[in-house]
């Protein structure tokens, strides 16, 4: 494939330099100088703090001679600079062409919303795989398909990685791809040229608003809804206040509280042998069934309804789906950690006020003596999230342990002190401990039989982000060891 075949449909503003390079054969695309070579086109992406055009001289040194950029810069006479309106859009378009439109060969289901993306896509991937469907998943927990597991640095990877991954999935015989679609991924044109068959809307809350994310909630909502302009069919949460913003294509609905195509009723919370769960009845024109879940929570009912609806839309055996749904869990999502201490220990990824309150309200369905919550808030982000988390814990917890959760470049104690403001005047007993392992050990030592302990924020993560370094931190293992040691004392 030559350069001209890749760029001819782009919104080109100007071409500068050696026009003969339009006939050059291209072997790859690159937006990172670590992958540049003489037969690759280098795309200079516009970032929040850096313009990729500053890396064009380095890409030239590494052998690349064709560059796509939003910014006009000087290039040598033997190079070609293509100025476009949007370099990220151009990379998405070129990646789709370069990998021969891979999403057209797959059933692609995109899931977006403030919460529930990871749990929903992981459940869909696990359950449909068990049901005999060749499936793949792309999201926060990585890329998985055909016995392949690849880590991802973003919930929704860059467009080049997405199209390359779908190309490899197609080559491996994958039929269905489940994908988390973040608002950032939408805003940065990472999914613009993916052919979505179904788009799922989970919920909307005030989150991801700040200097390095979205400037306003309206902007956040706008980019979320954009996914539904790219899909053939929409599956939306009829109970969410913003649902009508997402009804932009052929629509199916799911719900608990309002009438919908897939509605849950007769909900029961179950507790046996230290493990939580629930059951409910699903009623719809195509499906009437009793559903069992190995995890509690109203939000998990919504996730289950999505799985059931998607299985039906993909013509997967629904009874088989329900069988696997009853025994499938997602790591770090309302995960019960067994122990001999007699406490209900819950590990969950909840890292904003909205999701943490959901977890707390779910656990209030069970009888307990005291509620203990260990939590923190990420660094280098909006302080709004810190206040929301602190407010929730101050409202519900008997004992709070404020600690570190990916502090990044910020002083962990500064973050902790910001959160602590929510506890002024509260009757909650509060502890501060920036060392998360010590915080875990301390809160477990404070717990007694019959208590509930929520370990919030890390979930499935196996690291702490300190500065620019991901320091290994396996929270579940640390909790298990601390619980065992506490019993031995």
Image (cartoon, grey):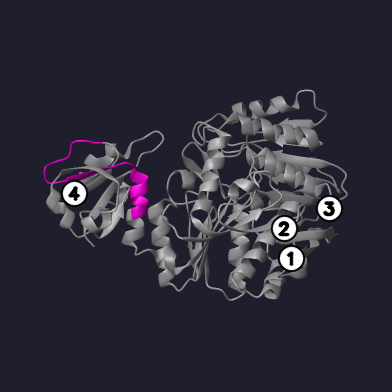
Q: Which residue is mark 3?
A: 342
Mark closer to the chain start, 4 or 2: 4
Task: Evaluate if marks 4 and 2 touch, with contact meaning CB atoms under 8 Å apart.
Answer: no
> Distance between the Cα atoms at labels 3 and 4?
66 Å
Mark closer to the chain start, 3 or 1: 1
Q: In which quadrant of the rendered view does residue 83 lie? A: top left
Residue mark closest to the camera, 3 vs 1: 1
Q: Residue 201: x percent and y percent?
A: 61, 52
Q: In which quadrant of the rendered view does residue 392 lie? A: top right
Task: Tell me the number on the disc at residue 260.
Answer: 2
> Distance between the Cα atoms at labels 2 and 1?
8 Å
Closer to us: 87 or 50: 87
Q: Residue 43: x percent and y percent?
A: 30, 47
Instruction: Tell me the SS state at disc 3.
Output: loop
Instruction: Tell me the SS state at disc 1.
Output: loop
Q: Is residue 361 left or right of residue 106?
A: right
Q: Which residue is mark 4?
A: 65
Residue density around tag 2, few if under 14, some if 14–19, many if 20 or more, within 10 Å: some
Task: Evaluate if marks 2 and 1 touch, with contact meaning CB atoms under 8 Å apart.
Answer: yes
Q: Which residue is mark 1?
A: 284
Q: Magenta part of the protein: which range?
A: 72-93
Q: Residue furthest top?
A: 425
Mark closer to the chain start, 2 or 1: 2
Residue 8 in sight here: yes
Residue 484 in sight here: no
Mark closer to the chain start, 1 or 4: 4
């Amino acid at each position: 494939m030559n350069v001209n075949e890749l760029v001819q449909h782009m919104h080109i503003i100007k071409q500068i330099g050696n026009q003969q390079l339009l006939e050059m054969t291209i072997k790859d695309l690159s937006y990172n100088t670590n992958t540049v070579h003489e037969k690759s086109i280098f795309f200079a992406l516009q970032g929040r703090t850096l313009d990729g055009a500053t890396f064009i001289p380095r890409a030239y040194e590494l052998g690349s001679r064709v560059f796509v950029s939003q910014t006009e810069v000087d290039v040598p006479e033997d190079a070609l600079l293509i100025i476009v309106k949007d370099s990220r859009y151009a990379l998405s378009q070129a990646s789709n062409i370069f990998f021969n439109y891979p999403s057209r060969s797959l059933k692609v289901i995109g899931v977006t919303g403030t919460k529930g993306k990871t749990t929903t896509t992981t459940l869909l991937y696990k359950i449909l795989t068990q049901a005999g469907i060749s499936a793949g998943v792309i999201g926060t927990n990585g890329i998985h398909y055909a016995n392949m597991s690849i880590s991802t640095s973003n919930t929704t990877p860059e467009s080049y990685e997405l199209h390359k991954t779908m190309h490899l999935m197609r080559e491996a015989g994958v039929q269905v791809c489940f994908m988390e679609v973040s608002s950032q991924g939408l805003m940065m044109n990472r999914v613009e040229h993916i052919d979505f068959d179904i788009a799922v809307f989970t919920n909307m809350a005030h989150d991801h608003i700040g200097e390095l994310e979205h400037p306003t909630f309206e902007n956040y909502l706008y980019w979320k809804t954009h996914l539904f302009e790219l899909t053939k069919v929409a599956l939306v949460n009829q109970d969410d206040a913003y649902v009508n913003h997402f009804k932009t294509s052929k629509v199916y609905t799911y719900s608990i509280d309002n009438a919908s195509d897939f509605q849950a009723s007769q909900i029961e919370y179950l507790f046996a042998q230290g493990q939580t769960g629930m059951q409910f009845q699903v009623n719809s024109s195509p499906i009437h069934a009793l559903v069992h879940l190995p995890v509690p929570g109203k939000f998990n009912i919504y996730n289950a309804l999505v799985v059931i609806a998607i299985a039906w839309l993909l013509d997967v055996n629904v009874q088989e789906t329900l069988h696997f749904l009853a025994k499938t869990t997602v790591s770090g999502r309302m995960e019960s950690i067994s122990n001999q201490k007699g406490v209900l220990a819950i590990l969950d990824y909840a890292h904003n006020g909205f999701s943490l309150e959901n977890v707390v309200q779910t656990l209030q369905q069970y009888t307990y003596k005291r509620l203990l919550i260990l939590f923190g808030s990420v660094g280098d982000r909006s302080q709004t999230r810190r206040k929301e988390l602190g407010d929730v814990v101050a409202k519900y917890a008997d004992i709070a342990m404020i600690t570190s959760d990916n502090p990044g470049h910020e002083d962990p104690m500064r973050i902790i002190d910001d959160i602590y403001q929510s506890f002024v005047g509260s009757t909650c007993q509060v502890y501060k401990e920036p060392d998360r392992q010590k915080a875990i050990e301390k809160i477990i030592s404070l717990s007694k039989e019959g208590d509930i302990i929520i370990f919030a924020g890390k979930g499935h993560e196996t690291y702490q982000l300190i500065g620019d370094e991901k320091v290994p931190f396996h929270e579940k293992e640390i909790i298990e060891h601390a619980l065992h040691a506490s019993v031995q004392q």
